[in-house]
Image (cartoon, rainbow, N blue to C red):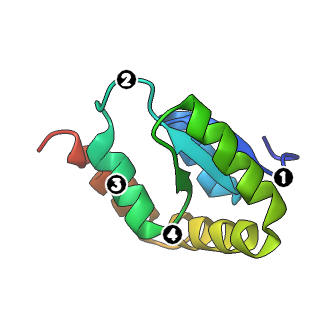
Amino acid sequence: MQVSNYAVTVYGVSFFELLYLGIPTVVFSPYDGKDQCELEEIDKLETALVARNEIEATELLLVLMKDDFLAKRLSQRSRALLNKSGAHRFCNEVANLNKT
Protein backbone atom coordinates (compact mmCIF):
# COMPACT_ATOMS: atom_id res chain seq x y z
CA MET A 1 0.00 0.00 0.00
CA GLN A 2 2.66 2.48 0.99
CA VAL A 3 4.23 2.53 -2.47
CA SER A 4 0.94 2.80 -4.36
CA ASN A 5 0.07 5.91 -6.33
CA TYR A 6 -3.65 5.07 -6.55
CA ALA A 7 -6.00 2.41 -5.21
CA VAL A 8 -9.36 0.77 -5.76
CA THR A 9 -10.88 -1.01 -2.77
CA VAL A 10 -14.12 -2.22 -1.33
CA TYR A 11 -15.37 -0.33 1.72
CA GLY A 12 -13.74 -1.70 4.87
CA VAL A 13 -10.54 -1.64 6.90
CA SER A 14 -8.26 -1.43 3.86
CA PHE A 15 -10.09 1.70 2.76
CA PHE A 16 -9.26 3.45 6.02
CA GLU A 17 -5.65 2.28 5.83
CA LEU A 18 -5.39 3.83 2.37
CA LEU A 19 -6.92 7.08 3.64
CA TYR A 20 -4.46 7.19 6.51
CA LEU A 21 -1.58 6.79 4.05
CA GLY A 22 -3.01 9.49 1.80
CA ILE A 23 -3.35 7.22 -1.21
CA PRO A 24 -5.90 8.63 -3.69
CA THR A 25 -8.59 5.96 -3.67
CA VAL A 26 -11.72 4.79 -5.43
CA VAL A 27 -14.04 2.94 -3.06
CA PHE A 28 -17.20 0.92 -3.62
CA SER A 29 -19.31 -1.70 -1.90
CA PRO A 30 -20.23 -4.97 -3.61
CA TYR A 31 -22.94 -5.64 -1.01
CA ASP A 32 -26.10 -4.26 -2.67
CA GLY A 33 -26.46 -0.99 -0.76
CA LYS A 34 -25.30 -2.31 2.62
CA ASP A 35 -22.72 0.48 2.97
CA GLN A 36 -24.69 3.19 1.17
CA CYS A 37 -24.89 5.63 4.09
CA GLU A 38 -21.16 5.39 4.73
CA LEU A 39 -20.30 5.83 1.06
CA GLU A 40 -22.55 8.88 0.79
CA GLU A 41 -20.73 10.46 3.73
CA ILE A 42 -17.34 9.65 2.20
CA ASP A 43 -18.50 11.28 -1.01
CA LYS A 44 -19.64 14.40 0.88
CA LEU A 45 -16.29 14.60 2.70
CA GLU A 46 -14.48 14.29 -0.64
CA THR A 47 -11.84 11.96 0.78
CA ALA A 48 -12.20 9.38 -2.01
CA LEU A 49 -14.06 8.81 -5.23
CA VAL A 50 -17.13 6.66 -4.62
CA ALA A 51 -18.26 4.20 -7.27
CA ARG A 52 -21.58 2.37 -7.50
CA ASN A 53 -19.96 -0.89 -8.63
CA GLU A 54 -16.73 -2.44 -9.87
CA ILE A 55 -17.29 -1.22 -13.43
CA GLU A 56 -17.67 2.39 -12.36
CA ALA A 57 -14.70 1.91 -9.99
CA THR A 58 -12.52 1.05 -12.97
CA GLU A 59 -13.77 4.10 -14.86
CA LEU A 60 -13.17 6.39 -11.87
CA LEU A 61 -9.67 4.97 -11.40
CA LEU A 62 -8.83 6.02 -14.95
CA VAL A 63 -10.21 9.51 -14.25
CA LEU A 64 -8.14 9.71 -11.07
CA MET A 65 -4.96 8.56 -12.79
CA LYS A 66 -5.33 11.28 -15.43
CA ASP A 67 -6.08 14.11 -12.99
CA ASP A 68 -3.07 14.99 -10.82
CA PHE A 69 -4.94 17.85 -9.15
CA LEU A 70 -7.80 15.56 -8.09
CA ALA A 71 -5.38 12.91 -6.82
CA LYS A 72 -3.47 15.47 -4.78
CA ARG A 73 -6.68 16.95 -3.35
CA LEU A 74 -8.00 13.52 -2.26
CA SER A 75 -4.63 12.69 -0.71
CA GLN A 76 -4.50 15.95 1.23
CA ARG A 77 -8.10 15.70 2.46
CA SER A 78 -7.75 12.12 3.62
CA ARG A 79 -4.49 12.79 5.43
CA ALA A 80 -5.91 15.90 7.05
CA LEU A 81 -8.93 14.00 8.35
CA LEU A 82 -7.03 11.01 9.66
CA ASN A 83 -3.90 12.67 10.98
CA LYS A 84 -5.42 15.20 13.33
CA SER A 85 -6.87 14.53 16.75
CA GLY A 86 -10.35 13.97 15.34
CA ALA A 87 -9.29 10.90 13.35
CA HIS A 88 -10.79 8.47 15.83
CA ARG A 89 -14.00 10.46 15.94
CA PHE A 90 -14.19 10.44 12.13
CA CYS A 91 -13.78 6.66 12.03
CA ASN A 92 -16.34 6.21 14.79
CA GLU A 93 -18.85 8.49 13.08
CA VAL A 94 -18.57 6.57 9.82
CA ALA A 95 -18.84 3.26 11.67
CA ASN A 96 -21.89 4.48 13.60
CA LEU A 97 -23.72 5.37 10.39
CA ASN A 98 -24.31 1.67 9.98
CA LYS A 99 -26.12 1.50 13.34
CA THR A 100 -28.68 4.21 12.65
Kindly identify which residue carries mark 3. Answer: 40
Q: Which of 38 and 62 is in front in this view?
A: 62
- Other residues around mark 4 within 10 Å, as few (<14) / some (14–19) / many (≥20): many
Residue named by callout 1: 5
Looking at the rendered structure, the secondary structure element under dot 1 is: loop
Q: Residue at x 76, y 49 (%)?
A: 62
Q: Which image quadrant for residue 76?
A: bottom right
Q: Earlier in the sequence, mark 4 or mark 2?
A: 2
Whether residue 88 is visible: no
Mark before the other along the chain sequence, 4 or 1: 1
- Amino acid type indicated by mark 4: Leu
> Label 3 vs label 1: CA separation?
24 Å
Q: Which amino acid does label 1 sit on?
A: Asn
Of the two numbered discs 4 and 2 in the rendering, the one whose residue sits closer to the viewer: 2
Sequence-wise, the earlier of marks 3 and 1 is 1
Q: Residue 67, image x and y in percent?
A: 78, 67
| Residue topped by disc 2 | 31
Which residue does the image show at 72% across and 56% down from the upper left?
63
Whether residue 70 is situated above or below residue 33 in the rendered picture:
below
The mark that comes first in sequence, 3 or 2, is 2
SS for callout 3: helix
Q: Which residue is drawn at 27% across and 47% down?
A: 37
* Residue underneath mark 4: 81
- CB atoms at circles 3 and 2 under 8 Å apart? no
Percent of width and height locating residue 84: 52, 73
